[in-house]
Amino acid sequence: MVGKLVILGALLSVVSGGYASPASPKPSNAEPDPAFAVSVTSNGVTYINKGIAAFGLIPSDFRDSIGDTMGGIGSAITLKRGTWKRSQDGTYSGTLLVQPDRGYNVISTIDYQARHHEIGFVLSPYYGAENLTFANAQKTLELKYLKTILHWDRNNVKTSGLDALGVRAAQRGFPQNPDADPQMPIANATYQHLSIDAEGLVENADGTIWVSDEYGPYIHHFTKDGHLIQTIQPPSALLPRTATGELNFTASTDPATGRIGNQGLEGLTTDASGKTLYALLQSATAQDGGLGSTTSRYTRLLAYDISNPHKRPELKGEWVIGLPLTKKGKTQAASEVHYVKENVFLTLARDGGGRGGSDNTSSYKQADLFDISRATDIHNTLFDDPANPIAVNGTLNSTITPAAYVPFVSIINDTQLGRFGLHNGDPDDQNLIDSKWESLALAPCEDPKYPNDYFLFTASDNDFLTTNGVFQGSPYNGGLNVDNQFLVFRLTLPGAEIPHV
């Protein structure tokens, strides 16, 4: 039945553009070198970054089973439940669900149907101090494309990545939705397709998935085969509105109040029980200082009760997160959030430097910790009305205590990158660390000697940049080949509680 089809890809090794995944090496049996360890303390607890354990990539011109270039897949990742396995030889295997955003859009947004992919992997951790060659480094995380699942709106209608120039009226329990307006030859006045710029991904125990979106900023619930079930609309303070109060979901212009264009719900995660869903706004709303790069620090974390599948999710918590600043006072926006344990989260904050970015050299790409145990819960208060900002011109309201924020894992540490044949800064080549890292996932090391150790997976969003691209059968040239890079770190996270993987 058209629309309910799960598109299956052949079990293909990642082979494209002249690159073939080499045979997997034997994993290093040595423990992580203590010389690499970096410790931080948050709320009296010490957390340790033991360094990079693996690197892998999917070539920039690899195509999914639909025939489209498979890019942007680091926009969100999660470990597929029940697939994580530790082998006796010290290797690990599993499946990652990876999610692209709105498609190749360097020139303009396109009619890209939302989707997620399944990527199998074998992890062979490397803890040695000797620098690997770029080719050998890729043996530590071998990736295999498995299949693609397309996402569908109501009535088996395709979703779209087109800029949300329209607003669909609320209907059948759904709120007013971002809608693709006619802006392509195939479109017309009745071209009503849910516009999604997908950025966060969570899998439930029943296989259904939650997807956070930048256009809304909304959270959509899909069946395991990609059909829309329901949509969560956030508090009014986050909704993009014009000066006269109308909803306007376009990402091409900034609103008078609500989320800034391309700064929507970037992060999505659940607690260990899977009963609470958390979503993180990328940076401050317009009324909270989001219109200025030096005033957009204070963003919001939302919590929803999703314990009862027969009830609409209810907002149960909301906290303010103060994001890190550059030396010039500019905000390092948040690209992801991941639950660690009660009140404690990892978030990924970064600049725009790196391969495919604004500059070859990056100064900040980190998975940081924040703790909301002593932060002010502002849900269902006057601050959910855009008329009452939490921060005027970037100055936080004195009645609000933000989360405690601690810098933690640097993705651009020169020593760590060098161990895997990578670098930060010139030259601009395939070994340059990618610009846009936007995803996090945790899995237990299952090491009896270190029971609190976990692997932290992260992947880049390459913006579909390739000189050999294809979309809907038509070629495109993005001007640069930017591979989809993956890194795995080993961390000590005392008391961590992660969903079953």
Image (cartoon, rainbow, N blue to C red):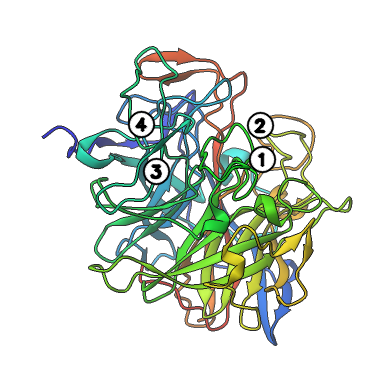
Within-10-Å neighbours for mark 4: few <14, some 14–19, many 20+: many
- Whole-angstrom CA distance, mark 2 to mark 4, is 21 Å
352 horizontally vs 153: left or right:
right
Mark 4, mark 3: which one is toward the viewer?
3
First in sequence: mark 3 or mark 1?
3
Identified at 37% across, 68% down, the residue is 88
Quarter location, residue 387? bottom right
Within-10-Å neighbours for mark 2: few <14, some 14–19, many 20+: many
Q: Secondary structure at mark 4?
A: loop
Identified at 66% across, 63% down, the residue is 388
Identified at 56% across, 27% down, the residue is 465
Name the amino acid, label 3: Asn
Question: Whole-percent x and y of residue 473?
Answer: 35, 15
Task: Give the number of callouts.
Answer: 4
Q: Are marks 1 and 2 in contact (CB under 8 Å)?
A: yes
- Location of mark 3 (residue): 177
Q: Are marks 4 and 1 in contact (CB under 8 Å)?
A: no
- Location of mark 4 (residue): 64
Kindly identify which numbered label has been placed on residue 356: 2
Name the amino acid, label 2: Gly
Quadrant position of the C terminus in the picture:
bottom left
Name the foreground residue: 255 vs 211: 255
- Whole-angstrom CA distance, mark 3 to mark 1, is 31 Å
Name the foreground residue: 5 vs 374: 374
Question: Whole-percent x and y of residue 46?
Answer: 68, 82
Within-10-Å neighbours for mark 3: few <14, some 14–19, many 20+: many
Mark 2, mark 3: which one is toward the viewer?
3
Kindly identify which numbered label has been placed on residue 360: none
First in sequence: mark 4 or mark 1?
4
Name the amino acid, label 4: Asp
Q: Are marks 2 and 3 in contact (CB under 8 Å)?
A: no
- Whole-angstrom CA distance, mark 4 to mark 1, is 23 Å
